[in-house]
């Protein structure tokens, strides 16, 4: 496995440095002799905005871990990754990268101000449910933020224009090309009259993106179950009919000339 490192800088009134180590697995033949590449991306970023420091680790652009610097622990995005997070042994190197990143901002950043092109990406937000929509059954709203650079953002939720508390911490991860994306999760129980909004503020530009969510094409829980049962029953009957037709067809004697 080879590795690459890259440093990006955005300089204006605020600096944002990104330090990324990318591991690229060499192509290996699959069971169909197809070549596949897989990339593990370890990205440390620090900036004068919020969050002021962060670590994202992704595999093929799917986030595996972030790092909670207030508790000095890796945070798995999914419970299935918890064992790997607890077995990590590189905390020292993470703190070294953090100190190195902060030193660049404080010592080198002012010297390069105005000499490096400024990179900006205005965030784009969209909201969807984590599971199929069923009224009265617990679900999770997902606010997905793309086209994000630098990763300085705050995410808040509203229900009928009233603030909603209880959203999980926002997960920020690096994607190919060293831009960023973010996810915010809100647990809720959907109702037909719901109106939720996810408000994303890009702090450096004072730019705000808002995505709305209202129920669409939802079925009541009991109706959805009945529809699924009916579809399954119909497919079963169709399979039986097709099977009988094939049996009769192949058992029919062949006519000779």
Image (tube, rainbow, N blue to C red):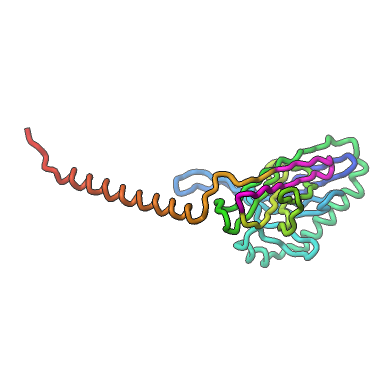
Name the quadrant of the C terminus.
Answer: top left
Looking at this view, is 155 or 102 the one in front?
155
Q: Residue at x 93, y 42 (%)?
A: 111
**Apparent side of residue 59 relative to residue 222 in the rendered image (left or right):** right
In-image side of 204 versus 31 (left or right): right
**Quarter of image, res 98:** bottom right
Residue 247 vertical position relative to residue 86 in the rendered view, above or below: above
Residue 198 is covered by the magenta coloring: yes
Between 28 and 143, the residue placed more toward the observer is 143
Is residue 233 left or right of 1 when viewed as pictured?
left
Residue 98 seen by the camera: yes
Which residue is outermost to the front?
Answer: 193
Q: Nearer the viewer, residue 29 or 204?
A: 204
Tag count: 0
> Which residue is pictured at 88% across the width and 48% down the height?
105
Q: Nearer the viewer, residue 100 or 141?
A: 141
First to last magenta residue range: 191-211
Task: Name the outermost residue toward the left.
Answer: 257
**In the image, residue 40 lies at what x, y percent?**
65, 51
Q: Position of residue 130 (x, y in %)?
A: 60, 52
- Judge from the rendering whether residue 92 lies leftward or rightward of residue 40; answer left or right: right
Q: Is residue 1 visible?
A: no
Assess whether residue 206 is covered by the magenta stretch: yes
Q: Position of residue 52 (x, y in %)?
A: 83, 53
- In the current view of this chain or complex, which residue is farthest to the top? 257
């Amino acid at each position: 496995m080879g590795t690459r490192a890259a440093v990006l800088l955005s300089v204006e009134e605020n600096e944002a440095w990104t330090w990324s180590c990318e591991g690229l697995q060499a192509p290996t033949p699959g069971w169909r002799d197809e070549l596949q590449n897989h990339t593990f991306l370890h990205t440390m970023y620090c900036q004068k905005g919020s969050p002021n420091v962060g670590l994202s680790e992704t595999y093929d652009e799917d986030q595996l871990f972030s790092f909670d610097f207030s508790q000095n622990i890796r945070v798995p995005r999914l419970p299935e990754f918890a064992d790997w997070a607890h077995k990590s042994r590189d905390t020292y190197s993470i703190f070294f990268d953090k100190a190195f990143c902060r030193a660049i901002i404080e010592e080198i950043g002012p010297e390069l101000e105005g000499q490096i092109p400024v990179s900006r990406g205005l965030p784009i937000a969209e909201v969807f449910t984590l599971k199929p929509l069923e009224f009265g059954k617990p679900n999770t709203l997902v606010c997905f933020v793309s086209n994000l650079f630098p990763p300085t953002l705050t995410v808040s939720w509203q229900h009928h224009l009233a603030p909603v508390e209880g959203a999980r911490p926002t997960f920020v991860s690096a994607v190919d090309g060293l831009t960023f994306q973010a996810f915010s999760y809100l647990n809720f129980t959907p109702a037909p009259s719901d109106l939720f909004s996810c408000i994303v503020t890009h702090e450096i530009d004072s730019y705000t993106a808002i995505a709305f969510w209202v129920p669409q094409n939802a079925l009541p829980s009991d109706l959805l179950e009945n529809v699924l049962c009916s579809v399954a029953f119909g497919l079963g009957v169709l399979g039986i009919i097709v099977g009988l037709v094939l049996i009769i067809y192949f058992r029919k004697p062949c006519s000779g000339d």
